[in-house]
Image (tube, helix red, strand yellow):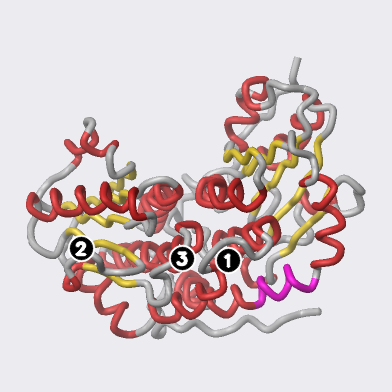
Amino acid sequence: MTTTPETSDLPAAPPGAAHTSREIGQQPRLWRRMAERVEAGGTELRAFLSPLLADPSLRIVLTGAGTSAFAGGIAAPALAAATGRTVEAVATTDIVATPHACFPDRDRPTLLVSFARSGNSPESTAATALAEQLLDHCAHLLVTCNADGALALAHRERADSYVLLTPPEAEDQGFAMTSSLTCMLLGALGALGAGEVRGLGGVAESAEAVLGEASVRQVAALTGRGLDRFVYLGSGPLKALANESALKLLELTGGAVSALADSSLGFRHGPKAFLTPRTGVVVFVSNDPYTRRYDLDIFAELSAALPTGQVIAVAGRLDGLPAAHTWLLPGMAEAEDAALALPAVVCAQLVALHTSLAYGVTPDNPFPDGEVNRVVQGVTVHPLP
């Protein structure tokens, strides 16, 4: 069935930003459809996953490259809690380069969960092949946007594999991964979290608020300051969100704006030297009461060090944060951080989009000379000895 792409919730985009703007704005609607897809495949999906999850020794490896790798980092703690199994996020780039280190136990039953927008990146197919070569028992859950990608085609008829497809519009046509990331993340959380990830049901409504006029004005106020570097900070799964946010800014500005990501505690250990008076800081504040204390500490410290308004908290609730410098995520006050990350990453996507436009870059194609590509090129996968 062919589905007509939905229009963006954002205002009409300037030339060179139509795809990216639409793909950021369409996310709440696609998330609802992604949840429906997981539910519609429930019987078949459960039949595939239940025997695997019944084994207490099962290791679940969440993998992908770049943004897709960060999806695994966001999801891993919540899925470990939901499944009661060992869950680790390991990038395909690490698997391909150091496969023996990533799969040290040949007899350990493993479910490899592969995130892939196109499924055509060389590391995507290489990682699944290496897992099978080094493991006696390996099953695959493929979460991808492209039914015709190499990864989906290689696995869709296999009994040891399940291909979970996002809505087709999630295969972003813009350079950077936006709706592809969030739909794949939501799909994995829904499929493996089995409804145990608190707050997941409210993410679409929260993101709709983030995409509203008032929130977009807040983003424009920050990105209109002429800042030339950004820092993103977060703890636990929100550190992976910080990494994704920094990558999105680098990508959409074509490298014109520097970006750094770290944990709230780790930032003081050297990376703090990155700060200048023209640095913007975004702190993703955890909902975990203990972890949150460290996020609040670094937010207060950096707010005192930088010009007023250049340090922003993104949070599900205020609780110790100044309202004037906090971007609230409605409905996320009690959400687990993996769910909180979904509307929070929309904030980061908007920052990247607005900064790109402020610097005169075309976000749909920030590298017109082809120096960096939408689907990675130039990778030689060497045979394993």
Q: Please give the name of the residue rendered at 55% of the width and 59% of the height, measured from the top-left corner.
A: 181
Say which quarter of the image contains residue 195. Answer: bottom right
Above or below, 241 relative to 21: above
> Which range is magenta?
33-40
Q: CA distance from mark 1 to mark 3?
A: 31 Å
Nearer the observer, disc 2 or disc 1?
2
Residue tagged 1: 173
Q: Looking at the picture, which amino acid does disc 3 mark?
A: Ala
Q: Please give the name of the residue rendered at 81% of the width and 26% of the height, measured from the top-left corner.
A: 133
Q: Nearer the viewer, residue 311 or 285?
A: 285
Residue 29 seen = yes
Left or right side of 69 for 51: right
Q: Looking at the picture, which amino acid does disc 1 mark?
A: Gln
Q: Please give the name of the residue rendered at 41% of the width and 51% of the height, measured from the top-left corner.
A: 238
Residue tagged 2: 320
Residue 193 drawn at (x, y percent):
65, 58
Q: CA distance from mark 2 to mark 1?
A: 40 Å
| Local secondary structure at mark 3 | loop
Crowdedness near tag 3: few (<14), some (14–19) or many (≥20) residues, C-alpha within 10 Å: many
Quick one: quadrant of the N terminus?
bottom right
Above or below, 218 relative to 281: below
Say which quarter of the image contains residue 248. Answer: bottom left
| Local secondary structure at mark 2 | loop
Q: Nearer the viewer, residue 34 or 253?
A: 34
Q: Looking at the picture, which amino acid does disc 2 mark?
A: Gly
Residue 378 drawn at (x, y percent):
60, 36
Residue 312 drawn at (x, y percent):
22, 62
Q: CA distance from mark 3 to mark 2?
A: 18 Å
Residue tagged 3: 335
